[in-house]
Amino acid sequence: MREKEAEEKKNKEAFELSVNLFQTIVIVAALIATITFAAAFTIPGGYDGNQGRDQGMAILSRAAAFKAFVITNTIAMVCSVTSIFLCLTAMGYSLSAAEEAAGYYEIRYAGAVGLIIVSMFFLIIAFITATFAVLAHAIALAVSTCIIACFAFIGYIVELGKFIARLD
C-alpha cells in the first residue's frame, strides 16, 4: 500500500513539475513571438512616407542586412510559435495514462525546448542584422554594437556546450 502511495505521490510531483516547465516554455515562447511580431511591423529604418511607387514600403528593403533581419526574425517567430503548439499538444498527452503517451510527451517537450533555443539564437541574429542595417552609415558604431550583441551569443554557445557535456 505504501509503495502505491509513494508512486502516486511521485507521479503527481512529476506531473506538477512538467506543467510548470511547460508553462515556463510557453511564456518564453510567447514573449519571443511578441517581440518578433512587433519587430516585423516596426521595421528597422521605418517606412517610406513619400508619395510614389514605394510609399509604405520599408526604406531599407534593398539592403542585405535588412533582408537578413527579415529572414532571421521570421525563423525566430515560427520556431517560438511552433514551440507553443508542441507544449499545448504535449499537455494533452501528459493527461493520458497510456504508456505510449509518455513518449509523445517527452518528444514534444524536447522539441519545444529545442525550438526555443533555435528561436533565441535567431532572435539574437535578427537584432544584430537590424542594428547593422540601421547603422550602416556609421560603420564603427554598427560593428561595435554587433560585437557587443555577440557576447550574448557566445555566452549561449558556452552554456549549451556545458549542458551537452553534462549529458555524456
Image (cartoon, helix red, strand yellow):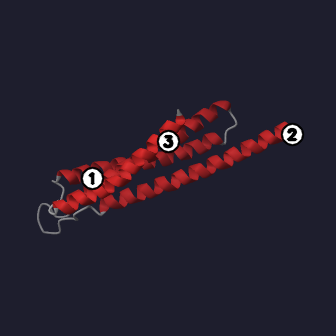
Question: To which residue does mark 3 refer?
Answer: 163
For the residues labelled 1 and 3, the Cα–Cα distance comes to 29 Å
Q: From this viewpoint, which residue is outermost toward the left?
A: 52
Q: Quadrant of residue 106?
A: top right
Dot 1: few (<14), some (14–19), or many (≥20) neighbours within 10 Å? Answer: many
- Observer-nearest of 154 and 25: 154
Q: Label 3 amino acid?
A: Phe
| Residue 30: image tag | none
**Which residue was labeled with disc 2?**
2
Closer to viewer: mark 3 or mark 2 = 3
Residue at 47% over, 52% down: 29
Q: Is residue 146 left or right of residue 157?
A: left
| Helix, strand or loop at mark 3 | helix
What SS does tag 1 mark? helix
Q: Nearer the viewer, residue 154 or 87?
A: 154
Q: Splitting the image into 4 quarters, where does residue 149 fall?
A: bottom left
Q: Earlier in the sequence, mark 2 or mark 1?
A: 2
Gap between marks 2 and 1 measured at Cα: 58 Å
Q: Are marks 3 and 2 in contact (CB under 8 Å)?
A: no
Residue 58 shows in the view: no
Picture residue at 56% right of the left edge, 43% below the top: 89
